[in-house]
Amino acid sequence: MIKRKLHNRVLKLLQHNAAVVITGPRQVGKTTLALQVTDELDGIYRDLENSKDLDQVRDIALFTGHYTDKLITLDEVQRAPEIFAPLRGIIDKRRRAGHRTGQFLFLGSASLDLLNQTSESLAGRIAYAELAGLSVVEIETASPEISETELWLKGGFPESLLSADESISLQWRLDLIRSYLERDVPQFGFRVPAETLRRFWTMLAHYQSGLLNSASLAKSLGTNGHSITRYLDILVDLLLVRRLQPWHANVGKRLVKSPKIYVRDSGLLHALLDLSSLDDLLGHPVVGGSWEGFVIENIIAESAPLNYQPYFYRTQSGAEIDLILAKGGKPEIAIEIKRSSAPKLGKGFYIACDDLNIKHRYIIYSGDEAYPLRSNIWASPLKEFMKTLTAQTGMSFGDKPK
């Protein structure tokens, strides 16, 4: 069993907050993580997809009254939205009794729906954490026999990655896609035909790492821009697609304003495109966009606990940065992504970094060694860059770890 990096973060959040929400797509490992945390803290676990457990917690005041000094973990909590309103009073009552932190751990497979329910009822009492797919750092620590390339091909869902061979992995991902379209989308109240949403999702896979062009997508799908926005919102809310926003500060340049679109898990991307092997992937036009999305998702997952916000930057004249990590409204780190063993930076990257006055500049490439390209630019493998990020906890980026 792979211990997730988020494990210690969740424990820390529970030490300082009355409630914590873990979000993430289905089958990414939320339940396994929650069970580990719950057992470690001698808590109570209920799965609200189980009808018996769901019936138990519908009267949340009565249920919590039996476990006044226990951590209560509720899985798939979006299935019982009615419990959130009374939870505020329950949390405050337990606080007055001296049980101020570590009261509730919630898990959910959607973002906005769940977060809106909790944020409206539990403002100031709750913290959030998102569990992404397995990362290159987690794999190196727990399963060094799995290569970065295998992780890229199969994606970060544990069942897919740990499958015995590529065909079993691919079938698992195809089944997950079908389950989302036929079960989860209707369950969350979205009324979209499964085949229509699958066609749209596959179109996004073909456009991986491209700018959102709603008019083009609407024409291809035979619908309108409003429907495209709605379909995209569904996949974003289910944490399956990322809408990476452009850096929007006024720098006196004509900036691209459309977001870039990524299927978040590389394994799902490859399944949507029927790419079952590394040879299939390397021979497909999506290979560059797939690698870019894989790198971006790994970096965003690693940088989120450090309060970095991700953006990209592009001007109408061609200055561009694939990924910016910003903090406090200021861009701190510029990252260019190249699937090459001998990466080279274009003039547009230098111009963009100068536009934004970014000091820390990296090119993430598919080699094995980190080395300086210039005095303030490093070429780095993904894994090494992520370790550099982790070492910055509690410091400004670039400081030497003590």
Image (cartoon, rainbow, N blue to C red):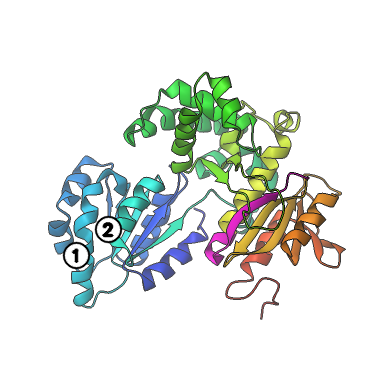
- Label 1 belongs to which residue? 89
> Where does the image place residue 121, in percent across and percent down from the top left?
27, 58
x 41%, y 22%: residue: 193
> Where does the image place residue 284, in percent across and percent down from the top left?
73, 28
In the depicted structure, whether residue 281 falls above or below residue 24: above
> Could you tell whether 159 is left or right of 23 in the image?
right
In the depicted structure, whether residue 150 falls above or below residue 124: above
Q: Is residue 223 magenta?
A: no
Quadrant assignment, res 396: bottom right
First in residue order: circle 2 vs circle 1:
1
x 51%, y 57%: residue: 4
Quadrant assignment, res 149: top right
- Label 2 belongs to which residue? 121
Residue found at the far top of this picture: 222
Looking at the picture, tell me which residue is in the foreground, 277 or 344. 344
Which residues make up the magenta segment? 303-317
Which kind of residue does numbered mark 2 sit on?
Ser
**C-alpha separation, residue under disc 2 versus residue under disc 1:** 10 Å
